[in-house]
Image (cartoon, rainbow, N blue to C red):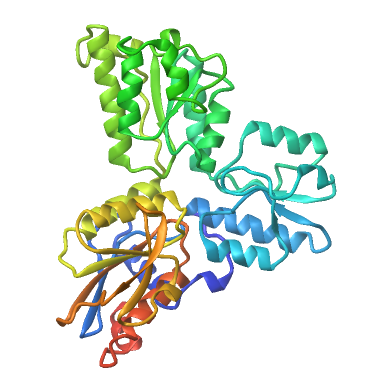
Amino acid sequence: MKSFDIPAYYRSTIITPLKEYRRRKDKLKRDFTPTTLDFGPVRFLIARHFGFCYGVENAIEIAYRAIAENPDKRIFLLSEMIHNPDVNADLQSRGVRFLLDTLGRPLIPFSELTPADVVIIPAFGTTLETQRELAAIGLDVATYDTTCPFVEKVWNKASQIGQKAYTVIVHGKPTHEETRATFSHSKEGAPTVVINDMKQAQRLALYMTGEQPAAEFFTEFAGQYSVGFDPTRDLRRIGVVNQTTMLASDTQGIADYLKQVMIRQYGLEEGSAMVEEHFANTRDTLCYATNDNQDATYALLTYPADFAVVAGGYNSSNTQHIVELCEEKLPTYFIESDRKILSGKLISHYNLHTKQELVTEDYMPRSRPVTILLTCGASCPDAVVEGVLNRLVAAFPDAKSVEEVMAEFN
């Protein structure tokens, strides 16, 4: 896989060599067992896969190249480069300004832009409407387009099934930048509707079968369907694609469910060629990194531990799903960086359910040794994970040194 030129301060003297050690030992990536770092009174089980993925490193390389190549120009990012506060803050410290917030609301009016400005398209991609608006100003929207190739793969899949007269069902968070971009590209060539989860898939099924009056669809799915969408016409042939960072099991469950609805609705025989008359044979469109990270998390969770720490941006979809998986098994602390570890007794962390940060006391058990599961999302730098590791180890004065523990991995 291509090696990217990203700033050295995103790398780690602990985590990066550890990843390389595992790559050498497992070139086919078939071993999902975690890596153990034993410091004596505390030990860490670190997920086999985590951190910067291909799409993120590609985006970061392009963004920093844009800065280097345009020292005398104004540089704008359409919205957050990736969902990581450290990366976005560093870009802003170098003079890069954001045009939109994560919900697509303007921070700087496009009317203030000139053809001489530089605009970077983030890794999530953007809508065709925004692309056209920027191009109409005379801006170059291609040179520094960092859209992840795996996001573009989803767009291509949506286009392919749209050309075969299927309606596209997008499984994703309706307000997420990537889902908004996928919806925009998909609706150019096919009727499209976004569903957030299985609950919405089940509601959509009621319109597929006619159990729910078609007129109510437009209220229930407001803002999630393409112009001219007709539930009585457009829900007879469907195909499912997804936001690349959703849980693979969730997307598969939704696809399987909607396929069964079609089989029952039209009296089809399971496995017959006629099924494809109503349900497109789309392969899962999650990116490889999301799959690897989720599989590594499942493997990590088969090991006993006292608690888990997941590092990453609070608005990172792929990180949120890792947190959800961990929460099902044991106490889990979702933190942006080591700054949230206030001491060996206090930790500030994000609650996915209340959408608030809270401080937990006595999170560290008294028994020894303490076992901690450690992982992060695909947009989290190795340096952040190193900081978290070091801060947690510092809570144990009698712990072995990092040099001692890392000796076997050199």
Q: Position of residue 260 (x, y in %)?
A: 24, 19
Which residue is more in the foreground, 90 or 355?
355
Image coordinates for residue 69, horizontal then vertical, percent: 76, 60
* Furthest residue in direction bottom, as rendered: 398
Q: Quadrant of residue 282?
A: top left
Q: Which image quadrant is residue 233 in?
A: top left
* Residue at left offset 39%, top offset 74%: 388
Q: Is residue 193 left or right of residue 331?
A: right
The answer to whether residue 80 shows anywhere in this view is: yes
Closest to the observer, 101 or 281: 101
Give the number of marks.
Answer: 0
Q: Residue at the spot x=29%, y=92% of the render? A: 397
Left or right: 311 with respect to 302? right
Q: Write the residue at 34% across / 50% down.
A: 321
Find residue 5 and report its image quarter: bottom right
Residue, x 38% and y 48% (percent of image)? Answer: 290
Residue 166, position as x, y percentages in the image: 44, 15
Tell me: residue 151, above or below residue 306: above
Q: Quadrant of the C terminus?
A: bottom left
Residue 383 x, y percent position in the rendering: 47, 72
* Left or right: 43 as drawn, with respect to 21: left
Q: Nearer the viewer, residue 153 or 243?
A: 243
Q: Is residue 332 above or below residue 106?
A: below
Q: Is residue 113 visible?
A: no
Q: Is residue 239 above or below residue 15?
A: above
